[in-house]
Amino acid sequence: MSLFFNAETKRFESTLPDSKYNRNVFLDVRPISEEDADPSTADRQAGLQGKAPHAFSNRVGFPPLTPREAFVDHFVSDATAPRVQNMVYESSRPIYLVLRALGVMPYTRLAKGESVFALSSPAMFYCAAFFILLTIYLQFIALSRIEIVRTLEGRFEEAVIAYLFIVNILPILIIPLMWYETRKVASIMNGWADFEIVYRKTAGRELELRLRTKAMVIAVLLPILCSLSVAITHVTMVDFRLLQVIPYCILDTITYMMGGYWYMTCETLSTTAKILADDFQKALRHVGPAAKVSEYRSLWLRLSKLSRDTGFATCYTFTFICLYLFFIITLSIYGLMSQISDGFGVKDIGLAVTAFCSVGLLFYICDEAHYASFNVRTNFQKKLLMVELSWMNTDAQTEINMFLRATEMNPSSINLGGFFDVNRTLFKSLLATMVTYLVVLLQFQISIPDEPSAMLLHNRTTLS
């Protein structure tokens, strides 16, 4: 709007620019419902004039009539519309299938390519039956382990090692926690599908991640390695029972497959951020890049939101996993260090394998989240700061500055529900806390004399 002085009326009057130069689409508009996927020409005109029942409540701007028309060049009806190809989901699909087979993710894929969570779905019934059978099996094992701990007569470190097998039953809680969060995970899957549609419209090509091979390797090798490590741990123990190994293999596979899910999610964020940064640099080589900068800013905001939602979607599950791994690492390393005076035995091999695998999983959870946050925000900011602004017009320079401001105002760190940020600092803090607990446990062990030494000291005191 501009003001000018009218000499005839002796008043300040305003002029409005032509609406065709101000075609902004606001986020609070209400698009047409997808039931009216093929409106007639009269309905289209009525929709543009705001007279149709499904018209936009916001009269500002000229948005498309349907959500599908916003992102595809040729409009097709629902009857002839092809299924949405979600490249992100297809890349990580093997991991999702393994987790669903283990009763963790009871989501359902619809025919049109969307992911939903429904309590009455066959996937939910299967996961519930799997969880009930596994819980009944674990009850007998837990009672057996508790009886072993109660009748244990030995040193303090042996009791701690015995408690380790009871703690290993705790990953059963991952299953109900993920049931609660599967709805949010399905929402992220659909968010990635929307991101791919916008990316296809902006960049003119599909989002090529090339992560399917990694997902296949993780889905095949990880359960095998988990079962092998559990077998080694139990075989080296004194009270080895073959029937007790099976549920421990399942629980260990669930824990590490959740780590595989986290790895693939963070790797998807990192790869997408790199592709988006490269496409953005190529788009700036063309003349008049102001419109393209605005489109890529919108894409980056979507990616930043997906990065934040990744942590919030599984906040309770991965908070529990981090605490569980911290506890397992502390007990395993303490069991190893307490055997230094007597020399390492066969049972220490299982403790070493457990400690090594748990530290590796915790490191990958923290490192991959740190790497994803770095690529989504910091690396993208570097690309923006390296843009040469001298040859650009004023609009393009303004868009670049707005892009930089958007990266500052929208954090891309992966946060677990507000509890803590998942990054390398978290890994360092957990290790520092673990060292403190190990020192306390070792001091407590030293303060308790061995039974033979105590008896010898008692006899000498009696004789004197």
Image: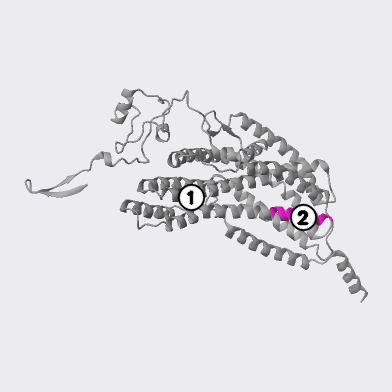
Above or below, 196 relative to 464: above
Does the image show residue 292?
A: yes
Q: Which amino acid does label 1 sit on?
A: Asp
Read off the magenta span: 346-358
Judged left or right of residue 170, residue 22 is left
Pointer 1: residues within 10 angstroms few (<14), some, or many (20+)? Answer: few
In the rendered image, which quarter is residue 138 located in? Answer: top right
x%, y% of residue 216?
66, 41
Which amino acid type is marked by label 2?
Answer: Leu
Q: Residue 44 carries which label?
A: none
78 or 152, which lies in front?
A: 78
Magenta-drawn stretch contains 355? yes
Q: Which colour scheme is used?
A: one colour
Of residues 134 and 306, the one drawn nearer to the viewer in this rendering: 306
**Looking at this view, is 248 or 300 the one in front?**
300
Q: Give the residue pinned by disc 1.
A: 278
**Is 335 placed left or right of 305 in the picture?**
right
Percent of width and height locating residue 253: 70, 44
Mark 1 → mark 2, Cα distance in angstroms: 46 Å
Extreme residue in the right direction: 463
**Residue 172 in view, yes or no:** no
Mostly what secondary structure, the magenta segment?
Answer: helix
Q: Is 39 colored magenta in this rendering? A: no
Q: Mark 2 points at which residue?
A: 351
The residue shown at (46%, 57%) is 382
Dot 1: element: helix
The earlier-in-sequence mark between 1 and 2 is 1
Q: Identify which residue, 98 or 76, lies in the foreground.
A: 76
> Which residue lies at the image location 39% right of the left edge and 31% below the top edge?
66
Secondary element at image label 2: helix
Q: Are marks 1 and 2 in contact (CB under 8 Å)?
A: no
In percent of width and height, residue 59 lies at 29, 36
